[in-house]
Image (cartoon, rainbow, N blue to C red):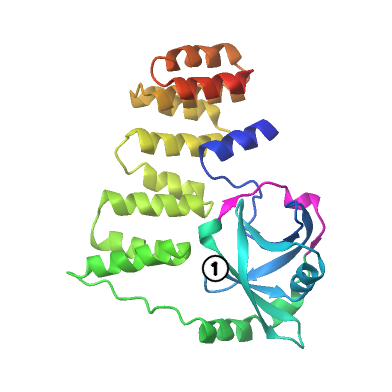
């Protein structure tokens, strides 16, 4: 199982911690988790509602830092704002540009899951978020203004507001069917961990190497290795990366002999990938 997780991380982002919930962890100077706390999401993808306790723990733990964990990724907390000191409620702002794959299993560490005070004050806190961080008003998609609407979606995407970006891209798609928009929607669903929807959109695209690799990546995450091999074999592609993916799949299902055949086929195509696959099989 550990090998499978490592390989999936190398191929495409995955959901190690399969949960829609978000948590903030205090980690020490060696990046080891000290304690976790459950969070509430807000109307913005980069802001979370938290109790004050993790901030206190961070302050009192020497050379520590705060990270938010969600959907198999970690995000460093770039700022914290106490919005109600009496009730112990704060906002945590994360840095999307520093996103990294999750490197530990949160369930193995102590997590404070009591968020009753956050739920009880959710509406008031949402209003404070809206006041402190007014979002750009979503423009109406009109004929002849698709480019402006696309720019808005791209801005949401760049700032990590993936749900907002997804909503805008889907509205654009209703106005105009374009492969690049379909691709963006598929990628966003993938990032959000909705592999079923991501697959639906990727299957609308031409079956080039990038699309096949993404569909194969989803199959690997879902452990549907038979379907992954079928996708590669039916694609008609004979590229180095396809042989590399086949080698990994054969390794995952315990067929090292077939995996080594892919190594030999890789050597004249891409020696670096061949070496990587060989190292994995040793």
Mark 1: which secondary structure?
Answer: loop
Instruction: Identify the residue at horizontal 32%, vertical 34% (top origin).
Output: 208
Q: Which residue is mark 1?
A: 46
Residue 147 visible in the displayed image: yes
- Residue 131 among those drawn in magenta: no
Pick the residue in front: 20 or 75. 75
Residue 138 vertical placement versus 256 (above, below): below
Taking the image as shown, residue 160 lies to the left or right of residue 3, namely: left
Pick the residue in front: 197 or 14. 14
Query: In this view, which residue lies farthest toward the front?
Result: 63
Number of labels in the image equals 1
Question: Which quarter of the figure has residue 75?
Answer: bottom right
Q: Which image quarter holds the C terminus?
A: top right
Q: Can you give x and y, in whole percent of width and height, for residue 178 in the image?
A: 25, 52
Query: In this view, which residue lies farthest toward the left?
Result: 144
Q: Specify the segment rendered in magenta.
A: 99-112
Instruction: Identify the residue at horizontal 82%, vertical 70% (top origin).
Output: 60
Instruction: Identify the residue at horizontal 38%, vertical 19% (top origin).
Output: 269
């Amino acid at each position: 199982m550990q090998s499978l997780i490592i390989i999936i991380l190398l191929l495409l982002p995955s959901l190690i911690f399969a949960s829609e919930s978000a948590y903030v962890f205090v980690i020490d100077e060696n990046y080891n988790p000290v304690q976790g706390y459950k969070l509430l999401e807000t109307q913005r993808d980069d802001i979370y509602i938290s109790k004050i306790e993790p901030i206190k723990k961070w302050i009192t733990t020497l050379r520590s830092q705060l990270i938010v964990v969600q959907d198999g990724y970690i995000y460093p907390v770039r700022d914290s704002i106490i919005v109600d000191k009496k009730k112990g409620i704060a906002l945590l702002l994360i840095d999307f540009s520093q996103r990294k794959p999750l490197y530990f299993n949160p369930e193995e560490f102590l997590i404070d899951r009591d968020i009753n005070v956050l739920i009880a004050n959710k509406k008031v806190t949402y209003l404070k978020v809206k006041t402190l961080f007014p979002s750009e008003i979503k423009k109406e998609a009109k004929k002849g203004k698709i480019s402006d609407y696309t720019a808005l979606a791209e801005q949401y995407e760049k700032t990590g507001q993936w749900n907002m970006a997804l909503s805008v891209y889907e509205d654009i798609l209703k106005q105009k069917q374009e492969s690049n928009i379909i691709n963006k929607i598929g990628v966003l669903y993938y990032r959000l961990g909705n592999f079923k929807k991501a697959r639906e959109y990727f299957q609308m695209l031409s079956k080039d190497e990038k699309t096949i690799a993404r569909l194969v990546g989803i199959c690997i995450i879902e452990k549907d290795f038979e379907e992954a091999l079928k996708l590669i074999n039916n694609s008609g592609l004979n590229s180095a990366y396809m042989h590399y993916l086949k080698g990994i799949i054969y390794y995952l299902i315990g067929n090292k002999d077939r995996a080594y055949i892919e190594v030999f086929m890789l050597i004249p195509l891409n020696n670096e990938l061949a070496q990587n696959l060989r190292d994995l099989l040793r």
